[in-house]
Image (cartoon, helix red, strand yellow):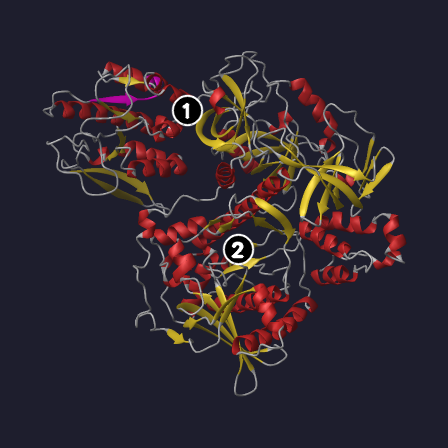
Amino acid sequence: MLTSRMFLKRTRAGAVVKVVREHYLRDDIPCGAAGCRLCPPRPAGPGLGLEEQPSGAASSLCPGPHYLLPDTNLLLHQIDILEDPAIKNVIVLQTVLQEVKNRSVPVYRRIKDVIQNPEKHFYSFTNEHHRETYIEQERGESSNDRNDRAIRVAVKWYNEHLKKIEDEEKIQVIFLTNDRTNKEKALEEGITAYTCEEYIKSLIANPDLVDRLACVSDEGKEIESGKIIFPEHIPLSRLQQGIKSGVYLQGTYRASRDNYLEATVWVHGDVEENKEIIIQGLKHLNRAVHEDIVAVELLAKDEWVAPSSVVLQDDGQIEDDIENEEEKEKSLKTSVNKDMLRPTGKVVGIIKRNWRPFCGMLSKSQIKEARRHLFTPADRRIPRIRIETRQADTLEGQRIIVAIDGWPRNSRYPNGHFVKNLGGAGDKETETEVLLLEHDVPHQPFSQSVLSFLPKMPWSITEQDMKYREDLRHLYVCSVDPPGCTDIDDALHCREVENGNIEVGVHIADVSHFIRPGNALDEESAKRGTTVYLCEKRIDMVPELLSSNLCSLRSNVDRLAFSCIWEMNHKAEILKTRFTKSIINSKASLTYAEAQMRIDSAAMNDDITTSLRGLNKLAKILKKKRIDNGALTLSSPEVRFHMDSETHDPIDLQTKELKETNSMVEEFMLLANVSVAQKIYDEFPEFALLRKHPAPPPSNYDILVKAANNISPFFFLYFFPSFQNLEIKTDSAKALAESLDKAESPVFPYLNTLLRILTTRCMMQAVYFCSGMDNDFHHYGLASPIYTHFTSPIRRYADIIVHRLLAVAIGADSTYPELLDKHKLADTCKNLNYRHKMAQYAQRASVAFHTQLFFKSKGVVNEDAYILFVRKNAVVVLIPKYGLEGTVFFEEKGKPTPRLDYNNEVPSLTVEDTTLRVFDKVKVNIMLDASNIQHQKIRMVLVEPKV
């Protein structure tokens, strides 16, 4: 059956055209019930449909067999309930699914996953195309009211349809809605309807499910005092007008890790001034949560403040002690130099909430048998959340997940609900799960639909694979990697050619041969963006069959590669460059140490060793050229754990030692990336995926310049005969590189490393971008006019896109629409930048957790340290032996506070009569502070100088 709608539409040119929309209705759409003989069989596909005898949880309200049918708002807000294993046999209407998709893509994805889970028996019913459940919108009826009516019509149809099934016990369809009007209308029409809370509380065997109910209304669950704490949020329509007229600014809200009463809003758009706005104080923060999109009103200039140097953690147990908060706010406002004042504002409204489920721990109420408790998130940037639970005794000491439901004006903290128990705090598996969830690292096992696109085993190279490839199996190719590396992306060769020049090849795993555009494997790799390396675990971007086997360039097996081959003279000047898809057979998989040993050993002169020596010699010339060109050699303390083979606990901790061969491999990877970047940009000036590193604004270097200019006098007395020896110039990368090279002292060799570590902190983040959407290509750190990532496609999705572009450029593969769509490429870059940033944070969190495990068994350790940063009430120190950074606080609960004098100009902190400056050498005691089980931390106490 065909129904059609006709309406008139005015075009841009002013003409009026008639538009006819055809809507096909069918009577062969199955109801999904397994016992139904009236409907045609369900088409094959994921999910098993509704059970013949619904098994779900037993309900005191509905003792008979029943299916559930939720409306849109219930599905949007109570998805945590619907995902619970106890809830089965749910009908999801097309009307509801479409509305959810329009309103929340994350919830839409979650409900689609549930529908595909065969154990849940959720069924998606296409009511908008069923002849008996489709309805037209009536005159004067809103879209929302029409959809509510469509849902009620579908419930009535289901109940009448199921009555016709000849079973002993009739199955009923229960309508679940939290909309009071919709429920009243349903009851008037003879439909059995309940709110979600009514139904969940009726489940006899699942009382704990009540804890997972979302508190939908912001006004719900208000605290008894009713005292208004926060200003009202301006409605969205007025906010949008204000943003258009320039009264308000729109931006992303970033809470501070160190100070819960301070945040920064990064303003969207191309505004030059007021790009970064400081928000200080509880009322000005006005219920915004980290990563929300907010509207901000700038304060008058006489109300502007400087970023606070105070470290403040919200660890008070009293829920609504506002007077105490006001005292803390006063401590932020100290007299500062006018030059340090920054644009300051207040949050006036929320444009988009970016709430997610948060990991953390329950802070159990002191009141006996209380149901209301505070939840403390693991991420210090997230406020504490008030939840109601009957399971407080069980959940105490456990890592749990909680979701925020709303934040009323009269509540110090947002309201939320319990979602899931992850396991005991401190347990290695639980803590790893927490850090993966907190850093939004996709880590679920690869789905069957993804795995179905892998090559069938046993796999071998076919004649078709060789069609556009060169056979390079005769070359003495080898790989050089860290010990234990199984995902070998790259291999190298070097040989002298007949004309006396040198041929050098970089051979990269041809991952794009196995991952074809647009399939489920490609989409999953694009979503993950990068492999994440934790201390004891690797979260692969691509399935293990590819990462550790078919794409890994292991020795003595034939592998598909993408090769970049140069002809160079002995001065490492490139004479010719060519790119080709190839087949290689690596002759050796070496570690950095093994490669170094071969280069250094006079007894070894085989082909691989000769190749390595040639590569090493050229790499040194290439590195010198880069550095002469202004490339920076920066430093960051990296640590390596030695694990106990049985317990897998760290038994030793030391900084990673870099060998000459590390640098050798790095130089040729950089050269390949630059060569490929130039090639794909020449071929696709609008669609090349490139990587840039913006030059830092001069203000970023303030801390480095101040630190270098104000090093303690005793440093100069012993190490620098004249003050001029240590001057950091920051007007260009070359000037900075040269001044860092000059800042050497034979008596204090670690000073140069400290300066380079501090310089690293001044840098901007390198990012991926689409060449057609930007005109600044420069890579500041590498002093290169153009750069990309080509050399690690097993672990970076950006490299896969670059491989596809290069393959099209050399005629080795065909293009596809998304590859040459700069807007799609820009979106891909945005996701990749986010995933790379989160992977870095997850890796640091993993190192921090394993460091805690290491010191847990060590007791108190006394070590030399150097001051990196000076704060108002603390100093941040670096311990070279462990590559470990930590904060020494001078204010402790229950102890008298020493006299503190902070000088921002130097910067220095005087504790009683002892002055501490950046780069001062000190001695600290290191121990594990486990007093707060959630935020266990390495505690450091100053031993020398004594204060």
Q: Secondary structure at mark 1?
A: helix
Query: Spatial distance from mark 2 to mark 1, Cα to Cα?
Result: 40 Å
Query: Can you say which quadrant of the picture contains the C terminus?
Result: top right
For residue 139, say whether it is visible.
no
- Identify whether 635 is placed above or below 346: below
**Residue 794 screen position, x and y as percent:** 45, 58
**Residue 232 screen position, x and y as percent:** 56, 22
Camera-nearest residue between 267 and 441: 441
Res 814 → quadrant: bottom left
In front: mark 2 or mark 1?
1
Q: Which residues are magenta?
A: 172-181
Instruction: Locate residue 499 relative to residue 129 in the image: left or right.
Output: right
Residue 768 is tagged as 2
Reading the image, the residue beneath label 1 is 212
**Residue 151 screen position, x and y as percent:** 26, 26
Q: Secondary structure at mark 2?
A: strand
Would you say residue 178 sits in the magenta stretch? yes
